[in-house]
Amino acid sequence: MKAYILKRFISMIPVLLIVATIVFFLIHLIPGDPAAVILGPEATPEEVEKLREELGLNLPLYSQFFYWLIGIFQGDLGDSIYMNKPVLQAFVEHIGPTLSLALLAQAISIIIAIPIGVLAAKKQGTFVDHLFMLIAMFGMSLPSFLFGLLLMLVFGVHLQWLPTAGYQPLGAGIWEHLKYMILPAFALGMIQAAVIARMTRSSMLDILSMNYIKAAKAKGLKERVVIYKHAFRNAFIPILTILGETFGSLITGAVVTETVFNLPGIGQLVVNSIVRRDYAVIQGTILIMATTYLVLNLIIDLLYGVVDPRVRLNRK
């Protein structure tokens, strides 16, 4: 197992190098000069050029990339030219709202999606099955930001049950924190629930058609035992895969939702950095998120062995 984990970590290095290279050069193709953005429109060309030299922006692109890459291997992602702080510090300061949003949205999606997917598989071909899958299809086609705006309109403006935007840290109290997170978490979680529900139904249908399930039913086992003890556990690996993918996308792809609900998370950090042409923050944040996604995939792969011992045996 240790050899497998080490092998996976080594295989991440070339992937991250490719990501770093693509991100660096793509970002530097964005029109605009960070020095000019910092100094404003009233700055003279001489002042802009002086600041470019101080920031190292006058160096050739390949030199900037080389120095940035050396810094990464030394654990230094660079400094924000706008916030005057290390990129890693800026990332840590903004990860709280994003992580809280992702965890809450994932919990909502699991609680809603898995029972619906199992029930739809049990009721295959019935009105219940068609209704749930129609709702899931609608959920998959609805953008999260649009659903978020609808939630804000209903629960924030008309009913005034919850705030429409803003953020309170967990230190302010659990309810104070949750009431600002419920609407964005539902906006993200319901969309993800549609994907998970369809995968749960599909995986359960594959297992329910197998001979050992028919044999269990023929023995007179209760339907609840057949479904949850024999069928669901064997159907869980594809569901676990989609859970890992959706959680990774919740962390890395909540930019629009965070912007709509004015959450000071990673999404807002990236958007503000793009507007300010803060190259170091954009590059460092995307690289950290790519690393997070790869590590999440590794964790999901390791969990396969917990769900199905045959997978664990194949890795020895």
Image (cartoon, grey):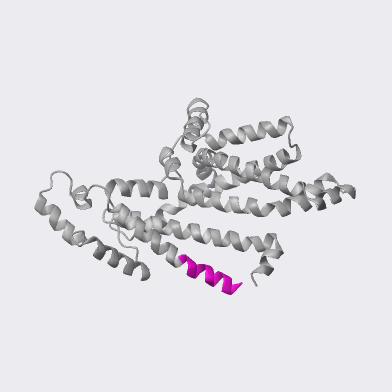
The residue sitting at the right extreme is 219
Stretch in magenta: 1-12
* Rendered view: 15 above or below 274: below
Question: Where 222 falls versus 64 (above or below)?
Answer: above
The residue drawn where x is 24% and y is 65% is: 63
Of residues 142 and 15, the one nearer the viewer is 15
Please say whether residue 224 is visible from this viewpoint. Answer: yes
- Residue at the spot 48% in from the left edge and 47% down from the top edge: 172
Q: Position of residue 311 (x, y in %)?
A: 67, 64
Say above or below: 160 vs 25. above
Give the residue at the far top of this rendering.
Answer: 158
- The C terminus: image quadrant: bottom right
- Most common SS among magenta residues: helix
The residue sitting at 55% across, 51% down in the picture is 245
Report x, y in % for residue 73.
Answer: 37, 70
The residue nearer to you, when weighing 72 against 186, is 72
The percent position of residue 233, horizontal first and vertical second, equals 73, 54
Answer whether residue 6 is magenta in the image.
yes
- Magenta highlight on residue 66: no
Residue 171 visible in this rendered orientation of the protein:
no
